[in-house]
Amino acid sequence: MAENLLEVRNISVTFKTRYGILKALDNLSLNVKKGEILGLVGESGAGKSMTGAAILGLIDAPGQLSSGEIFYKDECISDAPEAVRGHEISMIFQDPLMSLNPLRKIGDQLVETILTHMNISKSEAIKKAKNGLKEVGIDPSRLNSYPHTFSGGMRQRVVIALALAPEPSLIIADEPTTALDVSVQAQILDLLKKLCKERGTSIILVTHDMGVIAETTDRVGVLYAGRLAEIGNTREVLTDPKHPYTRGLVESTPRIDSNSFKKSLFQIPGSMPKLDAMPSGCAFHPRCAFASDICTKKIPPILHKRAACWLLENGEL
């Protein structure tokens, strides 16, 4: 078994408001192995992006990491995530226009990032920046171009080059293909997989797209209302889901076969609960067709190292 690069142990993220304390992440635990791509999937509000922000210490007040610990290479980084932010753990944000300074050339931004995190000369940083652009499929001559001169897909490639520039061991990719068309999306995902394989870099891929999960990841964690609903090998989770929520996500994914066009696409009833109206017990029970009395009263742990569902304990899934 591959060694764990990152371990998230029972973390909770809370926000103190005038209406009380809201819990965005609730006792979440997961790990990332060296060289693997771990997907985090779920509806909007599930806690996917919040997990990435918690790992890097990017939660603004009044939010805080209220409990739990985060270990990177067996060292606790919960209290000092800035020690690994950028150089050891990088992040690719959802919107490249928000990550790039429109008033500065991309070469200047790349060189600045490299010099900030690596002890090398400026000439070496410029050379590394050119190689970084070439690695993501951009002509190094574009080093002096401004972000607005690039297409959406090309800007995302620049952001990937920025994330890779300090040679991190882990990249958190927060829905990096959301704003891109399907063909460009495939190119970006192929690029991430290629770089992960060549460099041995681990990736946490945040997405709401089960198709992206199926094509890209080695393992997948399904989040619901700030809790981990299911986690496991991607193929096993998608072909034999053990949590009703995971099953609903899989069944609601469009498929290209003759039978799928003859029936309406499945839809999970209801919606993600609000943080100030979290149901008791299992947060999914108001939307679950299999919910029993215990589901409304007691939060299920991860059972058999797979899913947080009382049905699994009773052998019903």
Image (tube, rainbow, N blue to C red):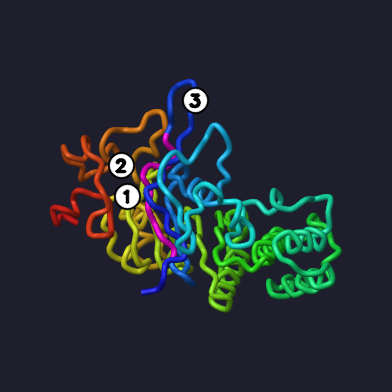
Label 2 element class: loop
Q: Residue at x 41, y 71 (%)?
A: 3
Q: Position of residue 178 (x, y in %)?
A: 58, 54
Earlier in the chain: of badge 3 and badge 2, it is 3
Label 1 element class: helix
Foreground: disc 3 or disc 1? 3
Earlier in the chain: of badge 1 and badge 2, it is 1
Q: Position of residue 146 (x, y in %)?
A: 83, 57
Task: Answer left or right for 269 relative to 192.
Answer: left
Q: Which mark is residue 17?
A: 3
Quadrant containing the N terminus is bottom left
Q: Position of residue 93 (x, y in %)?
A: 61, 53
In magenta, the rendered stretch is: 23-32
Looking at the rendered structure, the kind of residue marked 3 is Thr
Per the image, the residue denoted by label 1 is 245
Structural crowding at the residue carrying mark 3, measured as other residues with C-alpha within 10 Å and reported as few (<14), some (14–19) or many (≥20): few
Per the image, the residue denoted by label 2 is 284
Give the camera-side residue of 30 and 42. Answer: 30
Q: Residue at x 46, y 42 (%)?
A: 45
Structural crowding at the residue carrying mark 1, measured as other residues with C-alpha within 10 Å and reported as few (<14), some (14–19) or many (≥20): many
Give the camera-side residue of 64 and 182. Answer: 64
The vertical placement of 25 against 147, above or below, is above
Looking at the rendered structure, the kind of residue marked 1 is Tyr
